[in-house]
């Protein structure tokens, strides 16, 4: 009986790739810093949810609860003087992770003149050129093309900067994303494409919406390497950021980071999230919560429950002060309707 032919050998890729990232080896002080930043985002977003329920925040409001390790882990590796960040409409956490004052962020949520975009951007469209944070964008996937433009600016001016462009698993199916991939690789632009895969986009499981649900592979036809990362572990996120930045800063072009993360709340405040069970959400919280993970690491480093309670109290005070400021500061003057519309005054 003839033997079955041997399966063809899988060809080895001859393309260079970034090294497989290792979890970041954080000092006790760095762990404390990660913990503070993630806890600040968590408590800030909880307060934003309360203010939305009370009617102080209008329009859309997308909370970042559960995804804190991604923004904190990645952005802690950036150079705030030269690197730029751009994201979609789930943007409060990214601004907080970049060290922007919670008061001006919360005031923007409530549409006040003291907000970082003078109350005209709201939850979805806040912006700060001073901090090299370029939004906050409501059009799904639009920020990917804009981030590619920011990366082109970094390369053109030779300023050494890298753009971190965030988008979600839903936006990963948008056409402009792949146009951007093609241009970024052709021109070897200094950009890290970050897919925050929180599994459900607006409300459809990534497995039902994407023929290729391993999203880190989405750049293969453009010769862009991809890395899949545990987005619930801040040390894994920081380690991946280190490798991606080393690759991009060496002039090797873009890289894709797929951050496997999870949002605990609905897509927005108006989403009852009936597409998943409470047991599923609670299971993720119990097994993979990014803040509880770091809390355990800190306890192993000798940080006491009393120390952590003090941090919690300080952060709650900061968030409450931001909320009080956002509720009491005045709304923009009517003349603000006409500013930032055209380059010149008419």
Image (cartoon, grey):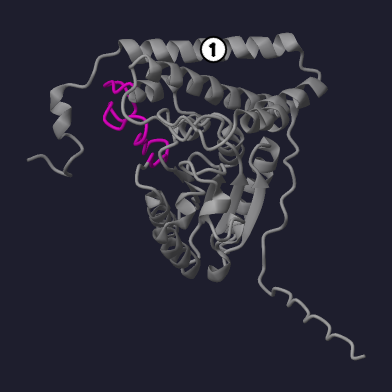
* Residue sitting at the far bottom: 2
Residue drawn 39% across the image and 10% down it: 324
Compared to residue 3, the image places residue 53 above or below, namely: above
Query: Badge 1 is on which residue?
Result: 316
Q: Where is residue 204 drawn, in percent x and y?
A: 50, 45
Image quadrant of residue 326? top left
Q: Where is residue 202 drawn, in percent x and y?
A: 45, 42
- Look at the image and give the residue range highlighted in magenta: 110-136
Q: Is residue 305 left or right of residue 37?
A: right
Q: Where is residue 137 drawn, in percent x and y?
A: 36, 42
Residue drawn 38% across the image and 20% down it: 52
Instruction: Report the front residue among 64 and 22.
Output: 64
Q: Is residue 86 left or right of residue 114?
A: right
Give yes or no for residue 117 being in the magenta stretch.
yes
Compared to residue 304, the image places residue 122 above or below, namely: below
Q: Where is residue 73 drawn, in percent x and y?
A: 62, 38
Residue 150 visible (yes or no): yes
């Amino acid at each position: 009986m003839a033997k079955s032919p041997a399966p063809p050998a899988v060809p080895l890729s001859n393309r260079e790739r970034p090294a497989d990232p290792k979890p970041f080896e954080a000092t006790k002080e760095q762990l404390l810093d990660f913990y503070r930043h993630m806890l600040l985002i968590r408590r800030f977003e909880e307060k934003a949810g309360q203010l939305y329920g009370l009617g102080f925040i209008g329009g859309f409001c997308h909370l970042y609860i559960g995804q804190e390790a991604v923004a904190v882990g990645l952005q802690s590796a950036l150079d705030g003087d030269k690197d730029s960040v751009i994201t979609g409409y789930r943007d409060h956490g990214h601004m907080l992770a970049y060290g922007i004052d919670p008061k001006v962020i919360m005031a923007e949520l409530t549409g006040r003149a003291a907000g970082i975009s003078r109350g005209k951007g709201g939850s979805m469209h806040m912006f700060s050129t001073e901090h090299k944070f370029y939004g906050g964008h409501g059009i799904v996937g639009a920020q990917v093309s804009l981030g590619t433009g920011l990366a082109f600016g970094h390369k053109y001016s030779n300023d050494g900067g890298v753009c971190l462009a965030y988008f979600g698993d839903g936006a990963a199916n948008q056409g402009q994303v792949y146009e951007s991939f093609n241009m970024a690789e052709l021109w070897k632009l200094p950009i890290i494409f970050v897919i925050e895969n929180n599994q459900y986009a607006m409300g459809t499981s990534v497995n039902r919406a994407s023929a290729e649900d391993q999203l880190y592979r989405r750049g293969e036809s453009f010769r862009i390497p991809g890395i899949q990362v545990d987005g619930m572990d801040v040390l894994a996120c920081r380690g991946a950021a280190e490798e991606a930045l080393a690759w991009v800063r060496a002039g090797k072009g873009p890289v894709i980071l797929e951050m496997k993360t999870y949002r605990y709340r609905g897509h927005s405040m108006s989403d009852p999230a009936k597409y998943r069970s409470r047991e599923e959400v609670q299971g993720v919280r119990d097994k993979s919560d990014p803040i509880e993970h770091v809390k355990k690491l800190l306890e192993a480093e000798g940080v006491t429950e009393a120390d952590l309670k003090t941090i919690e109290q300080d952060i709650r005070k900061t968030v409450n002060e931001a909320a009080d400021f956002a509720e009491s500061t005045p709304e923009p003057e009517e003349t603000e309707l006409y500013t930032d519309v055209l380059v010149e005054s008419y």
